[in-house]
Amino acid sequence: MHRPPPTVRAEVRVTLQELKYIVTVARERHFGRAAKACFVSQPALSAAVRKLEDELGVVLFDRDTPTVSVTPHGALIVAQAQRTLEAAHEVERLARAAQDPLAMPFGLGLIYTICPYLLPHWVPELQALAPQLQLLLQEGLTAQLLERLNHGELDAIVVAEPFDEPGIETRLLYEETLLAAAPLGHAWQDAEVVTAAMLARETVLLLTPGHCFRDQVLQACPDLNREPPAASALVQALRNSSLTTIRHMVMAGAGVTVLPATAVTIADHMQLVLRPLAPAQHRQVVLAWRRAAARPKPLLLLLQALDNALDHGRLPSARRS
């Protein structure tokens, strides 16, 4: 049902919380997901957005479509709301940092193919160095994490190269090799390396589009973009899976895959055929942060903690460049 435009009031009072709500709705295109991201109930968020629309005298969102869309006037207001939130966040950050660089929580984002393999080794070292530093961790795809970084929702992100964004500074954390993985008894057991041509003859289980690791594998073997029709149903079904799920499917004989070395466990060496790719393929993992909003002390602690983890052999498959 079409909703008539609200009537503008003489005095408009807008809160930062309301601005956060509309920015999140615009990003998520869904009131339920936006409410979850804001840690409020959907009715409470919807009511707050309606109230703001009434205050402003502008309909911000078109609710008559399957996914919520931003109206033309709403897009202008949402963009300004985002700038206002970033300015408010910067004021808060500067004030807290002036008192104690470690007092303010540090938002750290990691891509899915790094987070579960790096954090168990990295976080204990960081806690030993700075037990007072509170980490707020988020997983996501590279594009999602970059957006949150640029919006000030994260202080730094861990992603894979290539990663070159304006205003973003990076520091190499480590490098790792990529390994082809097949079930025990596979023909690769007699091979020293696996070539792109050998991969192309197999049913290769990959992550969903949007994962940078998937893109790197496809770059190493472009023929994998052309999936055999008989395998497409299985390949499509697994595309929303994790590396852990894909690894277990490979163990069950459903196909082969490519894994980053840090994701390979001691048990994997006994349950999979693992071979390096030829030519050798590597992944460089970097820490990235906004140059204009850098928090030097926490960043230095993160780097030191990873150095300690590598020195203690906690991540044996990772190498310094």
Image (cartoon, rainbow, N blue to C red):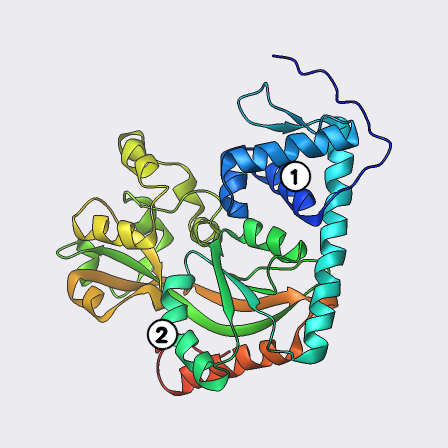
Q: Is residue 182 above or below residue 93?
A: above
Q: Secondary structure at mark 2?
A: loop
Q: Which amino acid, mark 1?
A: Ile
The image position of residue 49, as x and y in percent, is 64, 34
Q: Name the residue at 44% across, 85% down.
A: 128
Q: Name the residue at 60% across, 32% down.
A: 47
Q: Residue furthest top?
A: 1
Q: What is the crowding at mark 1: few (fewer than 14 residues within 10 Å), some, or many (at least 20)?
A: many
- When asked about the image quadrant of residue 312, the answer is bottom left
Q: Is residue 173 above or below residue 34?
A: below
Residue 91's label in the rendered image is: none
Q: What is the crowding at mark 2: few (fewer than 14 residues within 10 Å), some, or many (at least 20)?
A: some
Q: How many marks?
A: 2
Q: Which of the two marks, 1 or 2, is nearer to us in this view?
A: 1
- Label 1 vs 2, first from the N-terminus: 1
Q: Which residue is mark 1?
A: 22
Q: Nearer the viewer, residue 222 or 208?
A: 208
| Left or right relative to 316: residue 220 | right
Quarter of the image with the N terminus in it: top right
Q: Secondary structure at mark 1?
A: helix
Residue 317's label in the rendered image is: 2
Q: Which amino acid, mark 2?
A: Ser
Q: Residue furthest right?
A: 10
The image position of residue 223, as x and y in percent, is 41, 43
| Left or right relative to 93: residue 66 | left
Q: Is residue 36 above or below residue 294?
A: above
Q: Nearer the viewer, residue 187 or 63?
A: 63
The answer to whether residue 279 of the structure is visible from this angle is: no
The answer to whether residue 134 of the structure is visible from this angle is: yes
